[in-house]
Image (spheres, grey):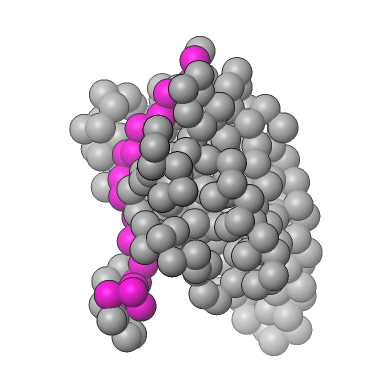
Amino acid sequence: MATYRVISIGTLAHNPEWGERGDVRPAHATTTLIEAGDERILVDPSLPEQILVPRLAERSGLKPTDITQVFLTNFHPMRRRGLAAFEDARWYVSELEREAVGAQLVEKFQEAERAGDGDLAAAVRAEVAQLQRCKAAPDRLADGVDLFPLYGVTPGSAGLLLPLPAYTVLVAGDAVATSEALERGKVISPVFNLEQAQESFKEAVEIADVIVCGRDNAVLNPLRRSM
């Protein structure tokens, strides 16, 4: 049976639900560890390596070499600051996200070359190398750990669904950003496609008893609090 543990609770740069305007803190994503059989899956290694590695040890007793898979809910740079610490793991992102980001990076590289911007071209090449290392995620990453498309925040954003015996857990990424967003039925802004993001939010709320939010802790679905 799969188990999950939040390694690091993410946060928004500013939370409109708290009356904040303008960035008041560094944004980072929630990092979650899923264990299923021999697989240890780290979702969204968002903190820098020098912070994330000791945090992983504090929360799980694991070292980077213990992680067998890394899954990115999307390919935004914020979600992969600590990715290089997990060189021994298999890296995954959804197939649609991989294709969409690949097309964007090709266009960005061509623009950098036309502008003669060597620094930008080098930065894009580094991103391309990471994207090439990321494989298209299978429908099932491990026993009891299923890919769950949550398109809208980005072209191919996706989460992981854990259908446990007594309840269902969804590691949702920014499809459900915070507990306040969940309570109020709101999606994060800005998004790639608002209509898709709203539909993904609806699907998340319909299927999951517990939601690991993209910028918050694991929370009970308010529509299922009788569990």
Instruction: Determine if the magenta segment contains residue 206.
Output: no
Spot occupied by residue 21 in the image (x, y as percentages of width and height): 32, 85
Spot occupied by residue 149 in the image (x, y as percentages of width and height): 68, 47
How many labels sit on residues? 0
**Up-down: is 121 above or below 39?**
below
Q: Residue at x 40, y 33 (%)?
A: 227
Q: Quadrant of residue 107?
A: bottom right
**Up-down: is 23 above or below 97?**
below
Instruction: Determine if the magenta segment contains residue 12.
Output: yes
User: Which one is in front, 99 or 198?
Assistant: 198
**Residue furthest toward the left?**
58
**129 relative position to 62: left or right:** right
Q: Residue at x 60, y 18 (%)?
A: 143
User: Which one is in front, 216 or 113?
Assistant: 216
**172 relative position to 130: left or right:** left
Is residue 128 visible to the viewer in this orientation of the structure?
A: no
Spot occupied by residue 2 in the image (x, y as percentages of width and height): 48, 21
**Residue furthest toward the front?**
226
**207 relative position to 106: left or right:** left
Look at the image and give the residue range highlighted in magenta: 1-18
Is residue 175 visible to the viewer in this orientation of the structure?
A: yes
Q: Residue at x 25, y 39 (%)?
A: 55
